[in-house]
Amino acid sequence: MATPAPGARPANPRFSSGPCAKFPEFSLDLLSDAPLGRSHRAAVGKEKLKSAIETTREVLGIPADYHIGIVPASDTGAVEMAMWSLLGARKATMVAWESFGAGWVTDVVKQLKIDAEVKTADYGDIVDFAEIDFDTDVVFTWNGTTSGVRLPGGDAIPADREGLTICDATSAAFAMDLPWDKLDVTTFSWQKVLGGEAAHGMLVLSPRAVERLENYTPSWPLPKIFRLTKGGKLIDGIFRGETINTPSMLAVEDYLVAMAWAKSVGGLKGLIARADANAQVIHDFCAAKPWIANLANDPATASNTSVCLKFTDDRIKDGAAFAKAVAKRLENEVVAFDIGAYRDAPAGLRIWCGGTVETSDVAALMPWLEWAFETEIAAQA
């Protein structure tokens, strides 16, 4: 007998892990102040870009002596810019426990050919930071977007480190309390936690990172979009909104209205609380169901944004096919879009729980998830 479908659906079925859901009150009308058809170098463009930088500082609590720049190519561009510009002065340690961190390892070891120790952990676990030599330059992701595992905090990073810490925080910024004093380079994009539009990245530099930039020149040539210094000095304009290449002023406006919304829900603390509440709904659901579990093996490291799940029922014959079928069934029912696991990750589901998602929508999804599971079990019998 077919399992009856639940009644209520999520009001917003967008649970993609990037680009992520727009904030609940979003409307295209909110972008009417975008200076379309104007130069980003005009006074109005510069003011918008400067506002994007300083509002980022305000919401995230970034120290006043840290530099914040808007850079090309999303978080990927920001990470690559940091690695190409800063690494090579001393030995590096590359830390990876999911797909994107593994990509940074490849770029550093195989492309830049830097002397580096590589430390990895399987999906569901993280590397023990107590075993890392922070007198080397350390590159790591704060939150594994494709593994649903995050650092629980920055206590293991010493204040008196000799090396730089380069942190890809793209699915952590605006959802987790980042310890800025432990991070020398931090990168993220607009398209994650605030649901902004793609293509733009943020690069946050500590004074230690700036000192490295001004006193070290890599042995390899740097493309124009990676250059952060001129004549041995930081190009300050980049960190006042004078971007390296042409930004989308529509995307800038979208980011500004998203941050205004963030401030209206309590700023960073409010955003963290919303993400925590969303993830807790799924954690509680998994605790009550024997056929599904969080991919994170330690609850202390479980992400509150990209919550990754695995099916554990012995009746499942082909895990990858089963997970895809469940995701497809939920999409067809207009219940959840784009929740299949990342292509390099273990078979399962990935449900975005960042602050732009409503907790009521996550709660409404859970009965549908059980319905889709039971329906697919019956279909394969």
Image (cartoon, helix red, strand yellow):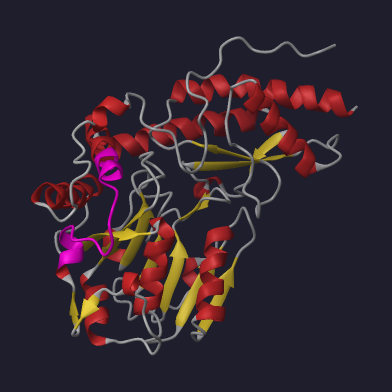
Compared to residue 230, the image places residue 60 above or below, namely above
Q: Quadrant of residue 320?
A: top right
Compared to residue 224, the image places residue 145 above or below, namely above
Q: On the rendered image, what quadrant is the C terminus found in?
A: top right
Residue lying at the far right in this picture: please name it.
Answer: 381
User: In this view of the protein, can residue 257 be seen by the observer?
Assistant: yes
In this rendering, would 15 be left or right of 80? right
| Near-viewer residue (315 or 22) | 22
Q: On the rendered image, what quadrant is the N terminus found in?
A: top right
Residue 343, image x and y in percent? 65, 51
Q: Quadrant of residue 62?
A: bottom left
In reply to whether residue 312 is colored magenta, the answer given is no
Residue lying at the far front in this picture: please name it.
Answer: 37
Q: Residue at x 51, y 26 (%)?
A: 362
Q: Quadrant of residue 325?
A: top right
User: In this view of the protein, can residue 183 be seen by the observer?
Assistant: no
Residue 197, image x and y in percent? 37, 43
Residue 2, image x and y in percent? 81, 13
Residue 269, image x and y in percent? 29, 38
Q: Residue at x 75, y 39 (%)?
A: 312
| Near-viewer residue (188 or 130) | 188
Q: Which residues are magenta?
A: 237-255
In this rendering, would 201 be left or right of 213? right
Compared to residue 227, the image places residue 264 above or below, namely above
In this rendering, would 307 be left or right of 258? right
In this rendering, would 91 be left or right of 364? left
Residue lying at the far bottom in this picture: please name it.
Answer: 219
| Near-viewer residue (295 or 109) | 109
**Image label count:** 0
